[in-house]
Image (tube, rainbow, N blue to C red):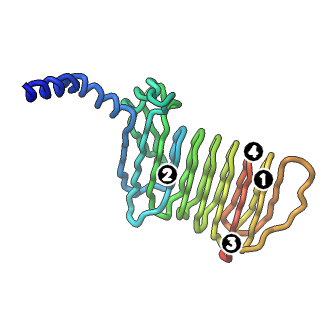
Amino acid sequence: MLVATIAALVLAFTPPPALAAASNTGRASLDRELSADVPAAGVEIVRLIGHDGEVAIEVGDTEHIRIRVHIKSKRKGLMRSSSRGDAYVEDARLETSMRGGRLQVELSGGRGREEVTETWTVVVPARLAVEVRMAAARIAIVGVAGGVGVKLGTGDLKVDVPRGAIDADVTVGNVEVNTRTDSHGEVDLRSRVGDTDLWLDGSRIDYPNPPGPGSRVSIRGSGRDRIKVSVMVGDADLRLGTRR
């Protein structure tokens, strides 16, 4: 009798197979990882076009470009996620296309991208240049020597590279750039609403700062690496040179 009662209770609390399968499918649609491995032969620039999340770009020791993106539907509450985000995660594809030495990397998959967070990890040969376009993100770029170009709507940007031209444009957020170049050309650092700090070979450059909410400093060199850092609202810190 006792055994029969326990068996009945187990059956009562065990979901039917169809319900369990539906639950697993729904959970899988919230969280997904995509990846690609692309030979770097013929590539000069890697351009990443994303939307909202995090980006980490670093250098590897092979002639391959390794790309990984984790996509996750944003939650609207403790127990409810975005249905449009779920649909996008389920349908998303990682696309790579090559044109004129530029490898473009992006996601495709229809509507709902604004309801998804993206976590990108990209490993490239050190010789390459990288370009990143994101609406909102935390971006870290380390080690690349071919140059850096970033356009970011809202978020924070950190760049630490040995050399190469830099063009960073952030609407709202903070920027930290560290380049050990020994050959800089024109350098322009500005914030329309915020502070700027420019360091050359370990020494801070003093400059007159007119009244107002913004700050700007420029210096000219005869070298190859042109550096431009611009922030609409936020602070910008630029350190260049071989000495620290």
Instruction: Identify whether 94 is placed above or below 122.
Output: above
Q: Mark 4 = which residue?
A: 233
Answer whether labels 2 and 3 touch (C-beta < 8 Å): no
Closer to the N terminus: mark 2 or mark 3? 2
Q: Mark 1 = which residue?
A: 190
Viewer-side label of 4, 2? 4
Answer whether labels 1 and 3 touch (C-beta < 8 Å): no
- Marks 3 and 4, how far apart in space? 26 Å
Amino acid at circle 3: Gly
Residue 241, label in figure: 3
Instruction: Identify whether 30 is placed above or below 138.
Output: above
Residue 102 pos. (x, y %): 49, 49
Q: In which quarter of the image is residue 187?
A: bottom right
- Marks 4 and 2, how far apart in space? 28 Å
Residue 122 pos. (x, y %): 45, 53
Amino acid at circle 4: Val
Closer to the N terminus: mark 4 or mark 2? 2
Q: Mark 2 = which residue?
A: 46
Viewer-side label of 2, 3? 3
* Left or right: 218, with 69 as reference point: right
Q: Quadrant of residue 91?
A: top left
- Marks 1 and 3, how far apart in space? 19 Å
All told, the count of numbered labels is 4
* Left or right: 209, with 120 as reference point: right
Closer to the N terminus: mark 1 or mark 3? 1
